[in-house]
Structures are given as structure tokens and as C-alpha cells.
Amino acid sequence: MRVLIVEDDVSLAVTLRESLAAQGFSVLLAHDREAAWETTWREAFDVVVLDVMLPGDDEAGFHLAADMREAGFHQPILFLSARDAVPDRVRGLGLGDDYLPKPFALDELLARLKALYRRGEVRSEVLRWRDVEVLALERLVRRGGETVKLTSKEFEVLLLLMQNPGRAFTRAEILDRVWGLGFEHSSNVLDVYVSNLRGKLGDEVVETVRGLGYRAPA
């Protein structure tokens, strides 16, 4: 199992990583909302352990979970939080799949993670459109069976669009999701990367939505 832990308490996060690794888990760590958001697009994972209170926002975990669901991530989310009031639990179970208040027993966390993993749903590992094939986990792209070399950011832009065929993304949305929150929205860097993708894969692989942004054809 590959677990993404989003926890701003570095000591707790490291302890969890070591404890889960001892059980054979592979663990990714992020300590704030922005780092976690970038990791969700860059890495493959099966389950998310998400603290509700993160730097800068006592409800950042709730907001991140909502963003992940809107973006099409269906991996199970287990909230881990010192906030154990009933309204918080209800909200967490509405946005995620489980809620474990702090302090907690490691054995209980392990049991809940295994239960979520058994029923978990992950994003498609292989995406296809006509003769374009994107292998998400391997970070490979093929067209007509031939491998096409893309830069990391070119791949992430293509992956975002192909995971949501027919959905139009604004330039600001793509910049936030691929380059990170706070990236300068007035930059023309995205247009350059889209041009590169079209040059490597064909003009039709990324459609321009006039006055809005870009989308992959449905």
C-alpha cells in the first residue's frame, strides 16, 4: 500500500512513516496544503491520511479533500485530527471516507488503512485517446505505439487534461494544479507548454476553449 500522509507535525509525520514502513507500507509525506496538492498530481498513492488543521488554515484539510474530489481523485481519505466534535466528524465523513481523532492507537490506524485499501478506488493508470496512450504510473506517453519524450511539466499538463476529457480548465486552474498555488497567473508559460505538446503529439490532442483555457477532447 502506498500512503500519502499530510501532517504539519513533522515529528508525528516521521513517526507514522517509520511505523507504517515497518509494516511494509510505502509512505509519502507532505506538511502543508500546497505540498500535498502538488504531490497528488506528481505521485501515485492508494490512501490519504489527512490532518484537518494545516499551516495557515484550521480547515485546510477539508478544503484539500474537496479539491481532490473535484479534480477526480477517488482514493480513500482518512482524516486524522485533534478536532473530534461531532460536526467535524460529520463534515469529514462527507468529504472523505473515515475519521480518526487524535490521540489514536497505531493498531487502529493500521486496521482502518487496510480496510480503506481493500475497498479503495484509484485513478485509471492508462489513459487513451485515439492513438495517444498515457501511462500514469510509469509517466510514459506513446503515440501510435511509439514513445514520445515529454518534460515533467508537459506530462503533468497532459495528464490533467486527459484525466478529465471534455472538461475545460482555465489557465489559472492548470497553473495552480501543475505549477502550484501562487504561481503567477499572467505568465504565458502554459501556452508555451501547450504549444510543445501539440508539436509532439499533434494539434488536436489539446483543444483551445476560447476565452477560457484548454481541454482534452472527449
Image (cartoon, rainbow, N blue to C red):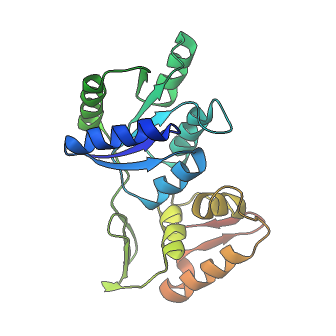
Using the rendered image of the protein, determine whether residue 51 is visible from the camera's viewpoint. Answer: yes
Q: Residue furthest top?
A: 86
Residue at (58, 45) in percent of width and height: 33
Residue at (74, 76) in percent of width and height: 188
Residue 196 pos. (x, y %): 58, 85
Answer with the quarter of the image where residue 192 lies. bottom right
Residue at (47, 23) in percent of width and height: 93
Residue 57 pos. (x, y %): 67, 35
Q: Residue furthest front?
A: 11
In this rendering, would 47 be left or right of 11? left
Q: Is residue 146 above or below residue 4?
A: below
Residue at (53, 10) in percent of width and height: 86
In this rendering, would 101 be left or right of 154? left
Residue 137 pos. (x, y %): 33, 63
Q: Is residue 35 above or below residue 138?
A: above
Residue 157 pos. (x, y %): 55, 68
